[in-house]
Image: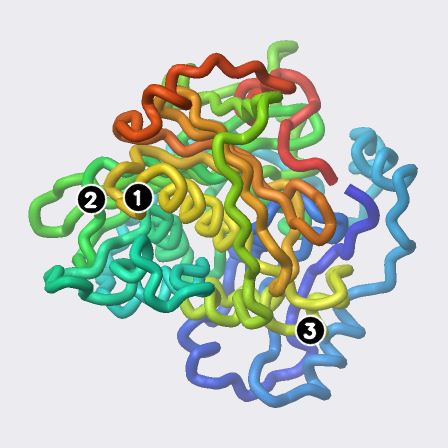
């Protein structure tokens, strides 16, 4: 992955935080509760335990100078060296040794988290992932932000529920799991899987239930899968499920036997594979993000300063703040809904995305889509750099009638078939490209 900034970040002095900061940061966050990147594999993964906020630019600069040391430029050779770091190298690190106790982790019972949301949050999220960004009266998207034609409620984009797991961590991006001791600066969010069980209401009181759905020893890393099931508070009816795949580099090698430890609560057919057909796409949707896209999306609850603070972004190795990974996932899902579902979000059954590379606000996201039965395979690229940043699929409730004859029955070949993180048994993880 290239050179890393090893953040053990604490404020170098007490600074007066604004009201929003006091709401976000607990008095003494545990080591594994971090401002996590929320976007997979970059050259400089970056996590901050707490950051000075407000107008104290001098304190912020002093914080940056103390917290991080310059790293040598990343090269193909240094990337390869990072990927092949041995257990002995890890042992000589000045960082605390990583350890995983699967029995403790799997026995932990997370507290339920209750919260409310309303139409304002739903509409703000839709704007944050680009709805009506090019055309304020777009007939396929206006109903996500406005009560069009007398509709009593606005419609909810299915990826809105990707915000729900963040409620488990008080906005800090990661849930503390007993039994997992790891270097938090090496944590990566690799994949996101969402299942929708019923149309998402535009306002509701809901409850999150969290569990460890997967734990896999990959030798050089541990893969943790956290599953959040969200239900209506009054009726108990289940709305959706999020499964977040988190890659903990340097925390592997905890298996007691020669067989690598692996645990999963979900069936084998939910091991996700990225299948990109070698035929021409069924549809391509280009969407230019706004320069302010990350600033708008952060209002939906992800306040990681990597997406808003230029000084922190530069220390992390980026020329400027980058877009949230889940925001990019929202753009891709919107492209599928607009291209194949006539703008109807209820047509979506499940969504899977694997994060590959960062996006800068202002860049154009080009989503290529292939309809294969009820499944739409997609790959999202940054047009200006011609680099893939996200890949995955969207499973539809049914084959769109207008496309069933021409596209739905077409046989497609695959240029690769990449198993998801939970499927691999060796040191490879399937997470990202570095």
Tell me if 281 is positioned left or right of 148 in this view.
Answer: right
| Inter-mark Cα distance, 2 to 3 | 38 Å
Instruction: Give neighbour class at mark 1: few <14, some 14-19, many 20+ (Cα, 10 Å).
Output: some
Here the colouring is: rainbow
> Circle 2: is it few (<14), some (14-19), or many (20+) Cα within 10 Å?
some
Residue in view at x 72 percent, y 74 percent: 311
Numbered tag placed on residue 199 in the rendering: 2
Q: Which SS class for mark 3?
A: helix
Q: x, y (%) of residue 335?
A: 44, 46
Separation of residues labelled 3 and 1 (CA atoms):
38 Å
Task: Mark 2 or mark 3: name the one nearer the start of the chain.
Answer: 2
Q: Sequence-wise, which precedes: disc 1 or disc 2?
A: 2
Residue 123 visible, this orientation: yes
- Residue 365 vertical placement versus 19 (above, below): above
* Marks 1,2: beta carbons within 8 A: no
- For residue 342, which numbered disc appears in the image? 1
Q: Which residue is mark 3?
A: 310
The residue depicted at 54 percent of the width and 88 percent of the height is 16
């Amino acid at each position: 992955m290239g050179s890393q900034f090893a953040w053990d970040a604490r404020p170098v002095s007490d600074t007066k935080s604004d009201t929003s900061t006091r709401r976000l940061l607990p008095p003494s966050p545990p080591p594994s509760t971090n401002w996590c990147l929320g976007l997979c594999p970059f050259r400089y993964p970056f996590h901050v335990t707490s950051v000075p906020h407000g107008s104290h630019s001098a304190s912020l600069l002093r914080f940056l100078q103390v917290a991080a040391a310059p790293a040598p430029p990343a090269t193909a050779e240094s990337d390869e060296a990072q990927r092949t770091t041995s257990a002995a190298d890890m042992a000589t690190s000045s960082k605390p040794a990583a350890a995983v106790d699967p029995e403790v982790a799997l026995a932990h019972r997370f507290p339920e988290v209750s919260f409310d949301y309303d139409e304002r949050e739903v509409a703000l999220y839709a704007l944050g992932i680009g709805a009506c960004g090019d055309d304020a009266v777009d007939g396929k998207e206006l109903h996500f932000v406005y009560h069009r034609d007398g509709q009593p409620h606005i419609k909810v984009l299915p990826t809105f529920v990707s915000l729900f797991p963040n409620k488990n961590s008080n906005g800090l991006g990661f849930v503390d799991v007993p039994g997992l001791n790891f270097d938090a600066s090496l944590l990566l969010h690799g994949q996101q899987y969402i299942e929708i069980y019923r149309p998402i209401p535009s306002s509701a009181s809901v409850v999150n239930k969290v569990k460890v759905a997967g734990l896999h020893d990959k030798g050089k890393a541990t893969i943790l899968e956290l599953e959040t099931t969200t239900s209506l508070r009054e009726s108990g009816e289940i709305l959706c499920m999020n499964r977040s795949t988190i890659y903990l580099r340097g925390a592997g090698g905890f298996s007691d036997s020669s067989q690598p430890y692996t645990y999963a609560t979900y069936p084998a057919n939910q091991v996700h594979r990225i299948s990109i057909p070698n035929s021409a796409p069924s549809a391509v949707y280009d969407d230019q993000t706004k320069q302010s896209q990350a600033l708008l999306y952060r209002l939906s609850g992800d306040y990681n300063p990597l997406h808003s603070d230029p000084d922190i972004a530069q220390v992390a190795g980026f020329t400027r703040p980058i877009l949230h990974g889940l925001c990019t996932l929202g753009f891709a899902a919107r492209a599928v809904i607009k291209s194949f579902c006539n703008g109807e979000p209820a047509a979506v059954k499940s969504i899977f995305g694997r994060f590959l590379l960062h996006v800068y606000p202002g860049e154009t996201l080009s989503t290529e889509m292939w309809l294969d039965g009820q499944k739409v395979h997609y790959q999202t690229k940054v047009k200006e750099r011609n680099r893939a940043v996200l890949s995955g699929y969207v499973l539809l409730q049914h084959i769109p009638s207008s496309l069933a004859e021409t596209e739905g029955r077409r046989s497609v070949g695959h240029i690769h078939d990449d198993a998801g993180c939970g499927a691999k048994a060796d040191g490879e993880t399937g997470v990202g490209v570095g």
